[in-house]
Image (tube, coloured by chain):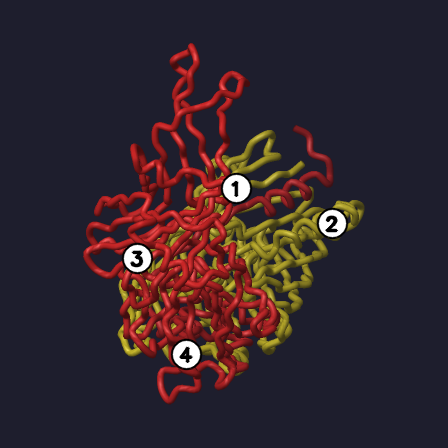
Amino acid sequence: MRFGSRYPFVLFGVLSGAACQEKLATPTDCPDLCPGNSLIILDTVLIARAGLDSTFTGYIDAGSVGALLISSGLDAGEARAFALFPKRSDSVSVDLVSKAYTIDSVAFVLNLIARDTAAHHLRFILHRIAPTTDTATSFADLDATLTPATVIDSTVVADTLKSGAVRVLVQGDALQRILPIDADSGRLGVGVRVNADVPTGARIGSRASLEGGPQYITYVHVDVVDTTKRKQQITISADTANYLMQDPPPPPPGRLFLGGRSGSRMILRFSLPKLIKDSAAVVRATLELTPAVPIKGLPNDPGALQVRGVLLDLGAKSTPLSVVAATAALPTGATSVQTADLRDVVTLWFGPNGTTPTLLLGLSPEGGTFSRPEFFSTASSTGAPRLRLTYALPTHPGQP
Amino acid sequence: MTLRSLFLGLVVLSAGAEKAGAQSSQFGARGLGFPLRPLSVRATGTGGGFGLFDPESALNPASIGLVTRLSTSFQSVQNWRHSESPAGSGSARDNRYPGIFITGPIGGTRLILALSASGYTDRNFQLASQDTLILRGQPVAVLDTLSSQGGISDLRLAVAWRQSRSVQVGLGIHMLTGSNRIASHRVFSDTAFSGVSEGSTISYLGFGISGGVMARIGRVVTLAGMLRADDRMHVQRDTTAIGTTKLPVTASGGVSFQLGERLRVAGSATYRNWSIADADLVKQGGIGSTNTTEFNAGLELVTSKRRPQQRPLRLGAFHARLPFSLRRGEDADETGVSVGTSFRFVADRAGLDLALSRVWRKGAPGFKETAMLLTAGVSIRP
């Protein structure tokens, strides 16, 4: 190996740049030895800005509810679901040839999302209703049609089933109850109600939900030589599925509330002290909401509170920040202060580019939950929404 | 050595200078850190006793005066240490590279140039402590860690004049630069509270000048002396200036005896008026500093007269007072012994030097530390 006059310098430069250093671990004693203090941790409570907390409603259109509600005797409100199915075909295609069929049975499939698991013998009862039913129909009008005379069939949901498909099988003479009616252009309307041993309710899938809306499956047989193709089925999804609710009385003025079929959101605004906004790091942030009355809803199906920040505070039309959200369960019947840890949401408020300290609260899925919490607002003498903030202030350690 | 080579070397040394450091210690948490010695592996093996006379050490600019060919060296230190404090004890290890050295004569003259990067102070530490806070009305246990990585490097450009085989003088210009990356973490026993951290970088910049002389008297005795003055150290936290720190004057003298053809012994004493930095350090929130003295002595026993650097035996010891105590008014010091040797290859064009040191450090009551340091250096003489 021959070294020119400059290569050793280059070699040592490269070596010095590539050299590594192991992580050190030296246990010792503070504050005797520590050159500086540990981060300062402080607690504070921020009350929502007075008069600037509100509830707004009407966030989802009638066809976009996240679930269909059905109830019987529930404090949170009476609800009946309905589904409308398009005309069923008069024939089925077997090997690309249309064939007439004979109906064996029919199954209505409802996708159970949640129920009160403590309520036994939950029964789904299906009624034939006019296919002109829509969200403009009043609850009373719909409920009036759900009489014993219009019953198609019913099924008892196994007490062990918490979610999943529930099939209501119609066969034999009962099939006469769903024969197409020419005046309805072959469309079929089905109303759904429930009952159980106690007042209860259930949430089933809507057309907008992941679980999917109600389905109407017709099992038929056709007269073909190939016996493996004789049994066929015709599956029709509801083209309209919704629910009508007999809402409880509206909360008195000055209260904040969530829930309802059209969706509602609470907006809370806070004022961050400048020292905290500029210098602090969030250790823990807990939103505290005090129920004004026991939270209404379906027992054992808590409301899912969602808390988000906003990009810009435009009041009711504020755009929620979708990146981070905090969630909390709102148990039915709860009277104690409800909390939600929102460190990730609140962290976005801090620093020079922090977002506005405004919170937008809603329930998930919007328009698809029985939960109807009412909270004290800043207009109340006590129990105003508050943010309990634990934060750290820097100490700039490293003193000589 | 050409100017182009020097410039190239300066560039690459500057790139690595910030990382240059040496042994870490709990005694490096205060002040500017743990003070380091700009010694070669050979000088380290002799307890620093040969430091003023050694052409590969960056202590005395006159010591390069007898260099006749281009030489480069690089060293690395493996450090195993055990620390004790009133809070408990623990062991740690780390690896650093405290020295890069390049020297060579300027052709046709009696001038010798040297460029070096060595550690001035080392501030690598990680401290842990526990506490209990009352948060939201409940006691919550917390664990704090405070760590620092970095130190201050001493970049030196030195020139020596070889008056004769007996007398050499030298002058060095120093740039002190480096940084401490400070990180503080606090975690909570209750996981509902998120851990928090803060970090900052404290950077340093200062300049100094040193002058030295080395004179051989007769065949046996060689004397050496060095005087160094450093200007104020400018200190910044991130981009904000937080003050300046006066740096000490260093005065060092030593004597070496050539006892026969195989044995050489040397000793030195060094004084630094670190108390000049005391007021500035206190003003910046520190404990302060005190003047220091250091004594070094060592010997080198040559086993081959024809190749004196092939497997010599080196022994040495030193004792030094540390400038930055853990508690004000309570001194800290370091005592060490060392042994070393070296190997030469390829017609002495390449070499490997080794030194093993055992050091004992103590400071405020309850604070003490022992460490074993293995220093290895590679040198090349193309």
**Residue neighbourhood size for the residue with mark 1, other residues' Cα within 10 Å, grouped as few (<14), some (14–19), many (≥20):** few
Q: Which residue is labeled 4 in the image?
A: A386
Query: Real-space Cα distance between discs 4 and 1?
Result: 56 Å
Residue B292 x/y as whole percent: 47, 72
Residues at marks 1 and 3 touching, judged by CB atoms closer than 8 Å: no
Which quarter of the picture shows residue B14?
bottom right
Q: Is residue B275 visible?
A: no
* Colour of chain B in the rendered structure image: yellow
Q: Is residue B331 left or right of residue B53?
A: left
The kind of residue on which mark 4 rests is Arg
Of all chains, the one bearing label 4 is: A
- Let me know if marks 4 and 3 both belong to one chain: yes
Q: Is residue A80 visible?
A: yes
- Let me know if marks 4 and 2 both belong to one chain: no
Q: Which residue is labeled 2 in the image?
A: B6
- Residue at the top extreme of this rendering: A225
The kind of residue on which mark 2 rests is Leu
Disc 4 secondary structure class: strand
Compared to residue B309, the image places residue B299 above or below, namely below
**In this rendering, the label closer to the viewer, 4 or 3:** 3
**In this rendering, the label closer to the viewer, 4 or 1:** 1
Which quarter of the picture shows residue A173?
top left
**Residue neighbourhood size for the residue with mark 4, other residues' Cα within 10 Å, grouped as few (<14), some (14–19), many (≥20):** many
Query: Real-space Cα distance between discs 1 and 3?
Result: 32 Å
Query: Real-space Cα distance between discs 4 and 2?
Result: 66 Å
**What residue lies at 29% left-to-right and 71% top-to-bottom?**
B140
Residue A377 x/y as whole percent: 42, 81
Q: Which residue is labeled 3 in the image?
A: A201
